[in-house]
Image (spheres, coloured by chain):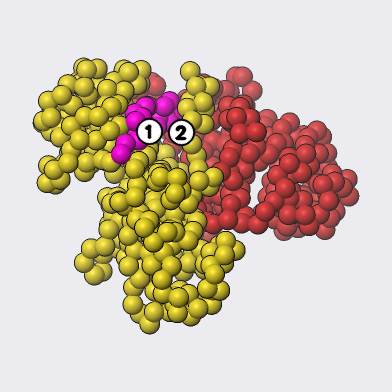
Chain colours: A red, B yellow
């Protein structure tokens, strides 16, 4: 029974998050499972899908990874050739993208090893949080960035942002709605880029994240930028391990899951077109 | 009676173009005029607005300019101080952006000279046409770019794109649905940028444009990229002055009005944050 790995892009506005919930609630997983069932002619049955990790309602992704298993009989029933060549998989994506709603798309699919697991094989996730800092709201970016009309000190936020790099206990940046116990995360990158026109992007990569971690870090950085907290607030909150010492949770709409990284043996989407943080960094440099 | 100049951003998806049509048809102009009437307490009357030029249904803008006149009594009725300071105008924009739907926003407002006319004072317009050239559609860019899944020869398109620079008769690039007679336009810039990840942007600046000109130029360039026409097709179509010799009209959703330029005396939005073609060009260069 072949295992397939797929790469997903979605606009989180009209989804109640990524994970399956009760019937009638529209989530990324439920939409995917339903459409896979249609394509593979399961007679109304969903095909279970495992995502690399949960994203909340309103959070976007263009590098979410998932896996699912498919019986050879279903492959044949779908009209695909059983060898699942690159061409066949591209045709499968086209067909699925024709069934899925416009706010969800499968941007790539590969045959994966049976041992590959979208969640447990991942060793790094990268998120970007977009802030639009200008006097008036944007009609074109509606729902895809966090609009901040007040004047903020971007340089202070940039200096503060590096405090979370390294291995730390992120208890202070964990939503109180969760009882996850493993709060020790290793952050490889934490950087605020200024792209001009008031467009800011906060990039963060870590082995894993505690619940709401990126949004609470951004909320703390925004408080620093707004002068509500000192530049040392992020490192102080981190050291305190106390949620009360960190800032508010920034809105979901600014957040986007950009990439999930796997060991070389499972690196199915290497060389796929992704907007790399390095290119962005150079673009940002042009501005300064 | 003060004249105000405003800068507009809109997502064209849900508008039947920019210009007022019959009652019940949602256009940028009708929405604006209605909301200005609400803000300035005209008792249900619209406040007439003049746009720099027409954009079709589905076409976006983030640099559209418009002007309108407002009686001093209406300014006072709205609660603004009659001197219309920078701060007062920012507050007016906030209030209007609170009334307008999310797909339309006023990004800036300035007091303009009585002689200023959003359409007739303009000496240059800049458009960008976005193409997404990758195997699968994008969920996040839905409706904001033209998706081209086939392999295209970008370098051929880039070489061909410069043919329209200069002063030419653009009869071949005029929609047959119009009887505009002045087909001579001066194009200052015509350039296709490759931004990576399959993202292409065609930037064009001219003193004016004939109806559907940008979309027909892009349609011709795409035919060249797809190998349906030779690299010389754009210059040949231009010389022919025959609409039949040019390519198809590319879809509206890829097009965005980026900037309208005025002489120095009317340069109300100079220094406003705009994504400049020069910065983009440098970003593009990083890729190549």
Chain at numbered mark 2 = B
Asked if labels 2 and 1 share a chain, the reply is yes
Separation (CA) of disc 2 from disc 1? 8 Å
Give the residue displayed 17% in from the left and 29% down from the top. Answer: B246
Viewer-nearest residue: A130 or A174: A130
Q: Position of residue A114 (x, y in %)?
A: 55, 26
Q: Position of residue B247 (x, y in %)?
A: 19, 30
Q: Position of residue A121 (x, y in %)?
A: 64, 30
In the image, the segment drawn in magenta is: B188-207
Chain at numbered mark 1 = B
Viewer-nearest residue: A71 or A215: A215
Q: Which residue is mark 1?
A: B203
Viewer-nearest residue: A56 or A70: A56
Give the quarter of the image for residue A32.
top left
Query: Of callouts 2 and 1, which one flags the residue occurring earlier in the amino acid sequence?
Result: 1
Q: Which residue is mark 2?
A: B277
In the displayed structure, does residue A244 sit left or right of residue B92? right
Residue A195 seen from this side: yes
């Amino acid at each position: 029974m072949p295992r397939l790995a797929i790469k997903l892009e979605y606009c989180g506005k009209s989804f109640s998050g990524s994970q399956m919930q009760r019937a009638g609630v529209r989530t990324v997983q439920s939409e995917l499972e339903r459409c896979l069932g249609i394509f593979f002619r399961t007679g109304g049955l969903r095909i279970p899908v495992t995502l690399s990790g949960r994203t909340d309602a309103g959070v976007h992704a263009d590098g979410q990874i998932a896996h699912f298993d498919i019986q050879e009989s279903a492959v044949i029933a779908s009209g695909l050739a059983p060898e699942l060549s690159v061409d066949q998989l591209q045709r499968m994506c086209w067909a699925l993208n024709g069934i899925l709603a416009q706010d969800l798309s499968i941007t790539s699919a590969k045959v994966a090893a049976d041992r590959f697991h979208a969640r447990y094989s991942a060793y790094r996730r990268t998120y970007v949080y977009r802030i639009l800092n200008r006097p008036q709201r944007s009609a074109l970016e509606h729902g895809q960035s966090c609009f901040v009309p007040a004047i903020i000190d971007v340089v202070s936020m940039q200096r503060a942002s590096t405090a979370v790099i390294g291995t730390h206990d992120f208890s202070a940046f964990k939503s109180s709605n969760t009882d996850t116990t493993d709060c020790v995360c290793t952050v490889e990158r934490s950087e605020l880029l200024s792209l001009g026109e008031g467009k800011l992007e906060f990039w963060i990569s870590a082995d894993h994240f505690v619940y709401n971690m990126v949004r609470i870090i951004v909320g703390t950085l925004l408080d620093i930028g707004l002068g509500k907290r000192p530049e040392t607030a992020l490192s102080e909150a981190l050291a305190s391990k106390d949620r009360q010492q960190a800032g508010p949770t920034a809105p979901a709409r600014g957040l986007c899951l950009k990439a999930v990284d796997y060991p070389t043996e499972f690196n199915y989407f290497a060389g796929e077109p992704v907007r790399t943080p390095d290119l962005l960094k150079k673009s940002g440099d042009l501005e300064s």
